[in-house]
Amino acid sequence: MLLHTTGIRRRNQAKNNTKRERREVMQAHGFRKFFDTTCTLNGTDGLYVDKLMGHDIGLKAHYFKPSSQELLEGNDHKLGYVSVIDALTTNEENRLRHENEMLKVNKSEIEQLKEQAENTNHLWLPLTHKLRNSSGRLTV
């Protein structure tokens, strides 16, 4: 089953050749619960989650009218759908791609710091040679 292969649900083993036990969540409804829980735990506002799931938000619907862009990307105060894509994705490819991008950025930052250190060393080496050759006298 899809839920088992994606890792969303563990296999339920029958005990003593009896019927399988009932589950806490129906399979079709499980995806909706997974989406809701994952979005909420990763910082998406509850109203955004309800709107994304098509829930009726009652009286709030008259006052709370985010644009599709806000639901997707969020704004300065609330996280949108895009911010939780990694948590919702059960395939490791997206996470690995993101991690690879971050490592490339870190590598370039490290290379820049190394270059700055080498430039600094080129400035200090002549000064240290002058100090050593001065035999105790400070000459610049």
Image (tube, helix red, strand yellow):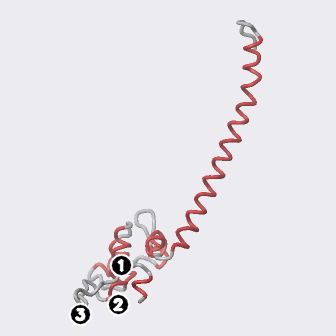
- Reply above or below: 59 against 128: below
Quarter holding residue 63? bottom left
Secondary structure category for the residue under label 1: helix
SS for callout 2 = helix
Viewer-nearest residue: 84 or 28: 28
Q: Nearer the viewer, residue 31 or 79?
A: 31
Question: In the image, residue 23 lies at what x, y percent?
Answer: 25, 85
The residue carrying mark 3 is: 19
Q: Looking at the image, how many numbered discs can be counted on the residues?
A: 3
Can you tell which mark lies on residue 15? none
Q: Dot 1: few (<14), some (14–19), or many (≥20) neighbours within 10 Å?
A: few
Q: Is residue 115 left or right of residue 91?
A: right
Which of the two discs, 1 and 2, labels the residue nearer the N terminus? 2
Amino acid carrying label 2: it is: Ala
Counting from the top left corner in percent of width and height, residue 47 is at 33, 75
Mark 2 neighbour density, 10 Å: few (under 14) some (14–19) many (20 or more): few
Residue type at the position of mark 3: Lys
Q: Is residue 31 above or below residue 111?
A: below
Mark 3 secondary-structure assignment = loop
The crowd level at tag 3 (other Cα within 10 Å; few <14, some 14-19, many 20+) is few
